[in-house]
Amino acid sequence: MKSIMEDCLRRFLDKGDRMTYEHSLRVGHLARIVAAHVSGWTEEEKEAFVAGCCIHDIGKRMIPLEILHKPTVLTSEEWRSMRRHPEIGMRLLHINGYMHPPVADIVQYHHERWDGLGYPHGLKGSEIPEWARVCSVIDAFDTMVSNRPYRRGLSVEQAKEELRRQSGTQFDPDAVELFLNVPFESFRAATEFCETYPFPGSSRWKRNLETNVHEAQMNATAWRRSGQ
Ligand SMILES: [Fe+2]
């Protein structure tokens, strides 16, 4: 699981997509904190959930940077292309022989909505796999509080309010409750790692992951040099 995470993150960096790279890191990290507060998941399941959240946008690898980083509103054609990233993600997992079901479910279903108005399949309520429902809340929270080229992020309080407002329409109410019941001090302390995040500072976790990614790159280069 670690290797698919590192490979996914490294490719975002190689492509010059720092925004998705950092978003993926933060969603993975928030997922780790949320998972620590879930009773009833084994340690293995928690790790798989974190991995799935970290690679949830793996399909964005194939979406052009001009669309991903566009500083203005997307055209309908560009939206159509953007909305294909869950299914592209599934194909990438398939090509890599990585179809661990709950993890693949996160990749495929994290843009489905509780009210059935999401994509790509328009699944509704409990038709959407549970892990994808929880990931969708974490993903939305991170997206709301992050600065984007075209807007400033919301405050944490505004984002929490928005989650409450959309509970039962966009989001599974249980997933919102699970997320909001995590003491926010643990997020505040643990998310001090990203320039684009509303909390200042740095994080050992991010540095560790970047070191791992760097090592993976070095290993890949050495491997290529050795002609294998
Ligand atoms: Fe996504």
Image (spheres, rainbow, N blue to C red):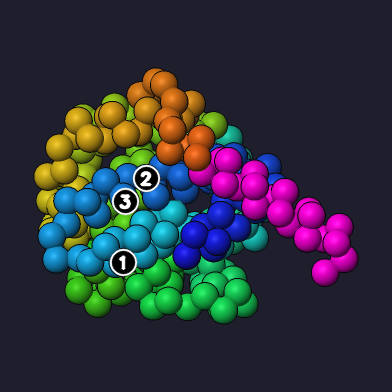
Front residue (pair 89, 38): 38
Image: 94 above or below 182: below
* Numbered label tally: 3
Quarter of the image containing the C terminus?
A: bottom right
Q: Name the residue under label 2.
A: 29
Residue 93 seen in this snapshot: yes
Residue 119 in magenta stretch = no
- Left or right position of 142 against 181: right
The residue nearer to you, when weighing 22 against 222, is 222
Residue in the picture at 52% in, 75% down: 98
Residue that carries the numbered disc 3 in the rendered image: 31
Residue 173, given in percent of the width and then of the height, sits at 14, 57
Q: Disc 2 residue type?
A: His
Residue 44: mark in rendering = 1
**Pointer 2 and pointer 3: residues touching (CB < 8 Å)?**
yes
Numbered range of the magenta stretch: 209-228
Q: Mark 3 belongs to which amino acid?
A: Ala
Q: Which amino acid does label 1 sit on?
A: Glu
Q: What's the residue at 17%, 51% (across, down)?
A: 37
Q: In this view, does 12 lie above or below 198?
A: below
- In the displayed structure image, the side of residue 224 where residue 60 appears, left or right: left
- Residue at 62% x, 77% y: name it: 95
C-alpha separation, residue under disc 2 versus residue under disc 1? 16 Å
First in sequence: mark 2 vs mark 1 = 2
From the viewer's side, name the closer residue of 64 and 56.
56
Q: Where is residue 196 in the image (x, y as percent from the top left)?
A: 47, 29
